[in-house]
Image: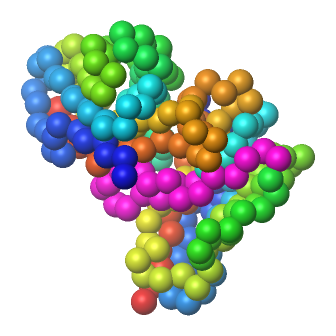
Amino acid sequence: SQQGEEDPQALSIQEGENATMNCSYKTSINNLQWYRQNSGRGLVHLILIRSNEREKHSGRLRVTLDTSKKSSSLLITASRAADTASYFCATVSSSNTGKLIFGQGTTLQVKP
Amino acid sequence: DVKVTQSSRYLVKRTGEKVFLECVQDMDHENMFWYRQDPGLGLRLIYFSYDVKMKEKGDIPEGYSVSREKKERFSLILESASTNQTSMYLCASSSARGSQRPYTQYFGPGTRLTVL
């Protein structure tokens, strides 16, 4: 079952602007992950944040996690046309079964 | 780098045919997964496997079966393909070992299956 809700479903920005995507989930988690998918391709892991972390950075990516609100956000700074893709959040439950529960995804278009 | 390969990028089959989708990973991961992805529905888990010869149903197992005879290979089988199984199929693998990125999934490039 899909427990993640992502917001917005679609986002269009100009190159150089920042892009923010939000994800909400329903159950207790071990960690939350963000993935990227270029059109017609498989997903690629971007960043993981554990349930005891509040913020994490990787290059131009910044992820926050608020376990009290069961929500996360992904910020891409200084976006580039090559960032155009779909972005998915996925959660690993506290029971650590290894299954990921994916959100519906946000489609990001970065215009040159 | 982890590599997950899928046997075909594009596949066209006829209704009623038996279809095999193969997935191979080269990182000795114990977990393997099959998803289908459809517009507006996101990724839906079909089956997964925690070990050789072990399988568990995901959210939408009807019309599918799987086989895992070797650790590196996980096959998805459509027993009798139907038009509503036209979709993008994604395979992934993961490991619980290693403390840095637990359960991060590594995906193959996907197989776009069309059933006529």
Q: Nearer the viewer, residue A7 or B84?
A: A7
Rendered position, A17 above or below A47: below
Display colour scheme? rainbow
Q: Nearer the viewer, residue B65 or A106?
A: B65
Q: Which residues are magenta?
A: A34-52
Observer able to see residue B79: yes
- Residue A44 occupies which quadrant of the picture? bottom left
Rendered position, B28 above or below B3: above
Q: Residue at x 42, y 89 (%)?
A: A112
Rendered position, B45 above or below B69: below
Residue A84 part of the magenta-drawn span: no
Residue A42 part of the magenta-drawn span: yes
Q: Residue at x 47, y 14 (%)?
A: B56
- Number of numbered discs present? 0
- Residue B84 occupies which quadrant of the picture? top left
Chief secondary structure of the magenta span?
strand
